Image (spheres, coloured by chain):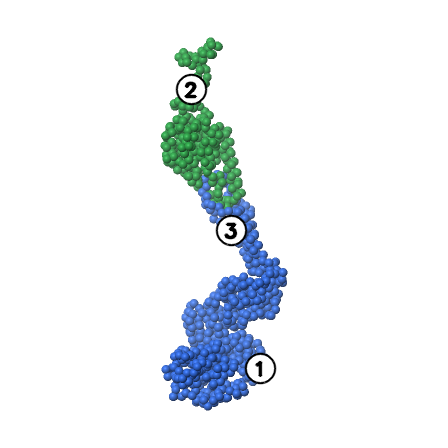
Chain colours: A green, B blue
């Protein structure tokens, strides 16, 4: 059963989308993405001196007429795409509830997966959790595998703390094919932590996109005024403070700075960045915001 | 601007309590949050303020202003064009002498009254009242608050019970008639309801108490010389108490008895065979809240026999009385009463006659004419059957009423008060009245022709009534507040009350009404002294645990009575409500995340 936001209309519109990559990858079979290898697509790539055995259909007779030399036209190879969806499944993704943060994040991931599957590309889902062994799905291909994707993301519940780089490292050790990596997380972690993680992805020659998922209560905490003992959902650390409008304002400024820092890092590292606040509608985000940042064609 | 309820201004002292929620370290609410990454150093910063944990947000000052406005509204500020008119009524009844710790209830009431007066503006006019012997103004003029305060300090409670009637109605009437802006009534009674003008302030707490509720001295009969004392002790306590009853005569202890009094019950201590003294005192040796009712006073009954003045148009009809020993009888015609009324007799018998007014002594009326002050005389009865009689009653004891058959009788009906002692089916034929210390018995039949062995029931009844009058002469004392009847005395006689105050008596003065204190009143006649005992005889004053509540009512507005006043409290209240809304708007209730 598809989640509620996945209406037939939404699915139809997702099928019209295609992921955009800024790198060329070696695919496994013909597809619609450029490969660094020369192939047989319609897209011209280069000329090469004719060698015996080359297909004479690709000889550029115009050049031969002008220069009396034989050149053959080379075309790009178009291959399929391997997409890796990394979903942060740490404890903070369950705040304030699964329904309000983790599920919306999964819905975004499923929408992306559906776009990939609808284009007959490969998608693999990774749930990032520190406590357990790396949890990753097999590669799925074909839109009918969306149900497998749903089953997979439903199989785990977010919990525990997360150190991004080591957790990613566990998954990346098993990664054999380069492709596009899309990372969904709240990124409520020190900048050094997420920078290490994202640099690790870059090192694996992946085309990276980042979607930051935040709940409305994280953007605008509705704490009552007065003394509070706030407990970190991951580390269980406690902080006592006197909550006030002044503190709220300062918190929001800090969050804005933190997000800006993340966005700036992504920009410098050539990573697509987008922020999804979970009380917003999924459809406009996927169909308008993500194409706007260049994630979709 | 003046305040009708200045006591409310004391609430300002409570305002610092508003700081408490901000001062005390409230247990912080524990909330889980996704990450404390961005909140880490907030806690150290909020605790590191120079004034510690005291965080006074602007809302505090709004709340402070709100409370100030509410307090001012409670104090009922008014703008008046003439001085504020206030009445202070002090309950000075006997129960106000009860101790509350170190101070009596009356002293506490005085302090409260003076505190109230201190809060009034100097231009206010104060009328000071006391409740007993009746609700009356202490000084017949309006006083400045300072003068009223000084006057209050000089007031003392009286040994008097509460006057009859409802305080609620009396106060409402006073408020209406005198157009007071405020009446402060300080009493030890619990108060129910609250009037718009009347503010009743209750002092004291319910307390347990024991009291001597009766002290009677009597000869065993009017022909006997032996004295008997009977002391009734009543408990107004919730637990059993052991009490020591002391009988004193001439200042010496004559006898003591120890009794155990059950909760809310009475016990009687009887003393016999003690020496003769002119005056006696019964004392309860116990330390309880009200010392006043631990003492009772009585004077020795007459040592001589019963002296009777009979007024009869038929003198011979009373001759049978002369056969009774210990009885001295003088029979006169009705016309001679004026000359003989001040004689030394103690009982008067009006035989077929009556006075227009009640006589000053105990009196027996036999078949009175229709013009008499006590009863309406009804139809004649021949050998009436006795269908009812009061029992137990000193007048009916030992009588076989089956054999009690007067030959002729007339029915009687009390005009205002009186108990039907003997009744026939047609109506009462004997009515007993006790009024202001005197006993009156009205008979619708003549018992005297039938005295002797031939008619024992009537003879016993005659002895009973003589005994009843004799007991009335000697046994009971006068209640505080009742006037003393003063017999004829020489010029220059002086009355000394229990406080030692001396009152010169006029020759014509037949009554002395200022019997406000319990004790012995001495009438100094020069060569001889007469002692009269006056006691608090209102058990309600002794019951300190359940004093009757006073029901106050909202007074009807007096047309034009307060047009000179402009109440400001509604505006203060309105402003407070607006501030409350503002506070709610600025500090809305927050839902839990």
Picture quadrant of residue A296: top left
Identify the residue under disc 1. B508
Q: Regarding mark 2 in the picture, which secondary structure is present there?
A: strand
Residue shown at 41% from the left, 31% from the top: A11
Residue in the foreground of this view, choosing between A170 and B169: B169
Query: Both on one chain, marks 2 and 3?
Result: no
Where is residue A10? Give x, y as percent: 42, 32
Q: Distance between the residues labelled 2 and 3?
A: 77 Å
Where is residue A120? Give x, y as percent: 39, 26
Chain under numbered label 1: B
Within 10 Å of the Cα at label 1, are there few (<14), some (14-19), or many (20+) other Cα atoms? few
Chain under numbered label 3: B
Q: In this view, does A257 lie above or below A59?
A: below
Residue shown at 48% from the left, 83% from the top: B369
Chain under numbered label 2: A
Within 10 Å of the Cα at label 3, are there few (<14), some (14-19), or many (20+) other Cα atoms? few
Residue shown at 52% from the left, 72% from the top: B159
Identify the residue under disc 3. B21
Q: Regarding mark 1 in the picture, which secondary structure is present there?
A: loop
Identify the residue under disc 2. A41
Residue shown at 45% from the left, 42% from the top: B32
Residue A265 visible in rendering: yes
Q: Are marks 2 and 3 in contact (CB under 8 Å)?
A: no
Where is residue A238? Give x, y as percent: 46, 43
Q: Is residue B355 above or below residue A23?
A: below
Q: Are marks 3 and 1 in contact (CB under 8 Å)?
A: no
Residue in the foreground of this view, choosing between A261 and B79: B79
Q: In this view, does B361 lie above or below B551?
A: below
Residue A240 visible in rendering: no
């Amino acid at each position: 059963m598809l989640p509620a936001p996945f209406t037939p209309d939404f699915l139809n519109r997702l099928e019209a989308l295609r992921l955009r990559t800024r790198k060329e990858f070696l695919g496994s079979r013909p597809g619609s993405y450029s490969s660094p290898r020369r192939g047989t697509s319609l897209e011209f790539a280069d000329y090469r001196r004719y060698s015996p055995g080359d297909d004479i259909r690709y000889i550029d007779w115009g050049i031969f007429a002008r220069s009396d030399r034989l050149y053959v036209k080379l075309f790009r190879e178009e291959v399929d795409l391997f997409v890796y969806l990394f979903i942060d499944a740490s404890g903070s993704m369950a705040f304030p509830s699964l329904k309000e943060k983790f599920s919306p994040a999964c819905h975004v991931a499923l929408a992306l997966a559906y776009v990939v599957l609808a284009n007959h590309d490969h998608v693999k889902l990774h749930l990032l959790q520190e406590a357990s062994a790396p949890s990753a799905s097999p590669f799925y291909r074909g839109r009918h595998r969306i149900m497998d994707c749903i089953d997979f993301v439903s199989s785990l519940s977010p919990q525990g703390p997360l150190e991004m780089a080591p957790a990613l490292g566990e998954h990346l050790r098993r990664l054999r094919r380069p492709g596009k990596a899309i990372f969904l997380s709240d990124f409520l972690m020190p900048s050094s932590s997420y920078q290490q993680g994202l640099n690790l992805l870059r090192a694996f020659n992946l085309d990276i996109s980042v979607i930051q998922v935040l709940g409305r209560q994280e953007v605008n905490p509705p704490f009552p005024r007065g003394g509070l003992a706030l407990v970190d959902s991951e580390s269980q650390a406690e902080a006592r403070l006197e909550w006030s409008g002044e503190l709220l304002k300062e918190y929001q400024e800090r969050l804005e700075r933190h997000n800006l820092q993340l966005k700036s890092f992504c920009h410098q590292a050539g990573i697509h960045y987008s922020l999804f606040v979970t009380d917003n509608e999924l459809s406009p985000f996927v169909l308008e915001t993500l194409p706007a940042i260049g994630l979709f064609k | 601007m003046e305040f009708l309820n200045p006591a409310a201004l004391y609430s300002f002292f409570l305002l610092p309590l508003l700081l408490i929620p901000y001062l005390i370290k409230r247990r912080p609410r524990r909330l889980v949050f996704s990450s404390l990454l961005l909140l880490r150093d907030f806690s150290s910063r909020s605790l590191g303020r120079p004034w510690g944990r005291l965080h006074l947000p602007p809302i505090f000052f709004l709340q402070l202003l709100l409370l100030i406005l509410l307090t001012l509204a409670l104090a009922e500020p008014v703008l008046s064009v003439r001085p504020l008119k206030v009445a202070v009524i002090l309950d000075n009844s006997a129960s106000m002498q009860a101790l509350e710790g170190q101070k009596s209830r009356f002293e506490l009431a005085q302090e409260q009254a003076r505190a109230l007066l201190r809060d009034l503006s100097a231009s206010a006019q104060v009328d000071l009242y006391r409740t007993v012997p009746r609700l009356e103004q202490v000084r017949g003029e309006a006083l400045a608050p300072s003068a009223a305060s000084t006057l209050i300090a000089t007031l003392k409670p009286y040994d008097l019970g509460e006057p009859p009637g409802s305080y609620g109605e009396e106060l409402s009437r006073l408020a209406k008639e005198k157009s007071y802006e405020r009446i402060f009534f300080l009493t030890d009674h619990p108060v129910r309801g609250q009037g718009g003008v009347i503010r009743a302030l209750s002092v004291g707490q319910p307390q347990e108490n024991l009291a001597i509720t009766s002290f009677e001295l009597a000869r065993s009969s009017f022909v006997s010389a032996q004295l008997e004392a009977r002391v009734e002790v009543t408990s107004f306590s919730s637990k059993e108490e052991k009490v020591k009853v002391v009988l004193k005569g001439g200042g010496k202890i004559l006898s003591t008895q120890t009794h155990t009094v059950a909760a809310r019950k009475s016990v009687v201590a009887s003393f016999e065979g003690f020496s003769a003294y002119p005056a006696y005192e019964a004392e309860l040796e116990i330390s309880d809240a009200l010392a006043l009712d631990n003492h009772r006073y009585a004077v020795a009954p007459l040592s001589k026999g019963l002296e009777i003045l009979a007024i009869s148009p038929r003198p011979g009809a009373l001759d049978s009385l002369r056969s009774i020993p210990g009885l001295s009888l003088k029979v006169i015609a009705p016309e001679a009463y004026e000359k003989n009324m001040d004689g030394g007799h103690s009982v008067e018998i009006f035989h077929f006659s009556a006075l227009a007014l009640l006589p000053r002594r105990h009196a027996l009326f036999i078949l009175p004419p229709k013009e008499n002050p006590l009863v309406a005389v009804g139809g004649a009865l021949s050998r009436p059957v006795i269908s009812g009689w009061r029992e137990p009653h000193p007048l009916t004891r030992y009588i076989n009423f089956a054999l009690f058959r007067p030959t002729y009788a007339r029915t009687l009906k009390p005009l205002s008060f009186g108990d039907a002692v003997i009744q026939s089916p047609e109506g009462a034929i004997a009515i007993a009245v006790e009024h202001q210390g005197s006993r009156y018995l009205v008979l619708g039949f003549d018992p005297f022709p039938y005295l002797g062995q031939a008619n024992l029931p009537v003879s016993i009844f005659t002895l009973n009534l003589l005994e009843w009058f004799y007991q009335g002469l000697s046994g009971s004392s006068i209640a505080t507040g009742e006037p003393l009847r003063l017999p004829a005395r020489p010029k220059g006689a002086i009355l000394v009350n229990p406080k030692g105050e001396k009152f010169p008596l006029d020759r014509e003065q037949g009554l002395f009404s200022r019997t406000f204190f319990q004790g012995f009143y001495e009438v100094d006649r020069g060569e001889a002294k007469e002692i009269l005992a006056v006691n608090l005889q209102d058990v309600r004053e002794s019951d300190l645990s359940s004093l009757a509540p006073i029901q106050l009512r909202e007074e009807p507005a007096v047309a034009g009575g307060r047009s000179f006043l402009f109440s400001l409290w509604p505006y203060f209240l309105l402003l407070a409500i607006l501030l409350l809304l503002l506070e709610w708007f600025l500090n809305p209730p927050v839902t839990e995340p």
